Amino acid sequence: MWSVPESETDRTEWPVSSPPPWPARVQATLWWHRSTAAGREFGKGSQIIPVTVAMMVDYLDSPVGPYREILASPVLRIPSRRIGPMPRMSVPFIAVDSEASVHGGRTHWQLPKVLAGFDGTVLGRMSAQGAGWKVSSTVMAKGPRLPIAGALGFAQPEPTGRLAIASARLAGRFRYARVDVESEGPTLPNWLVAGSHRGIVITDGKMRTGPAKRV
């Protein structure tokens, strides 16, 4: 499965999860920054937008129960006839604290989920830690809560050369924020840049992640 070392695991047996769509209530912190040279390497051979997007998510409920998640996409894929009309993330790093969610990510969406421990609150300071890596985010939200509605798209590479395309639709309220980030690990600091970044916090949201199609 397409991933960085921080998102690799030898384990193959997981509690079975139900197929999508997956509805959920969420709170989340999202941030972004210009892709580094190492980050742009993940999009080599594809048309990309050189922006890295990352997020910490608290799933308040879902088909596999409550869980927390961190994910990051080094670049965004430019909309095309193949992937559809929206920019899409390609995610080589994603971790959760739910075994059933690991199964769901790897089985339904080609997302290389691994288990991690989480501490803190997603709208304040949260840390995620796994085998040999750690990421922390500290949020400084500002301004009023505003309505938000849209979608997040994924395009996950498969060994065959095809892409698993999926979308998560989101509606709720958000605030603008500055997000202070720390990252440790064998590869993460090279492309998930530490420092203060622009971002938003989803204070209350409803999300629905649909099934993947192969293109």
Image (tube, rainbow, N blue to C red):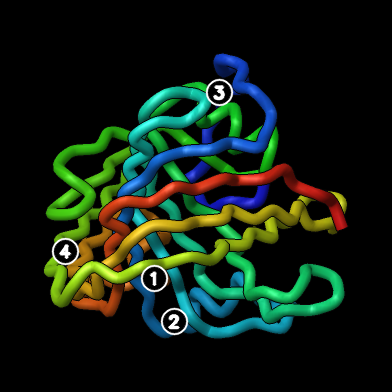
For residue 131, say whether it is visible: no
Residue 137 shown left or right of residue 16 in the figure? left
Dot 3: element: loop
Q: Which residue is mark 4?
A: 139
Where is residue 86, by image quadrant?
A: bottom right
Per the image, the residue denoted by label 2 is: 36
Residue extending furthest front? 147
Which residue is label 1 attached to? Answer: 190
**Residue 132 relative to residue 161: left or right:** left
Q: What amino acid is found at the position of numbered circle 3 in the picture?
A: Arg
At horizontal 57% and vertical 18% (from top left) the residue drawn is 14
- Confirm or deny contact between disc 3 and disc 1 (CB under 8 A): no
Which of labels 1 and 4 is toward the front? Answer: 4
Q: What whole-number distance in Å separates the C-alpha atoms at marks 3 and 4?
A: 33 Å
How far across and down, in percent of the image, does residue 169 sit? 56, 55
The residue beneath circle 3 is 11
Looking at the image, tell me whether mark 3 or mark 1 is earlier in sequence order: 3
Mark 1 / mark 2, whichever is N-terminal: 2
The local secondary structure at tag 1 comes to helix
Q: Earlier in the sequence, mark 2 or mark 4?
A: 2
Q: Of the residues under marks 3 and 4, which one precedes in the sequence?
A: 3
Residue at left 49%, top 76%? 38
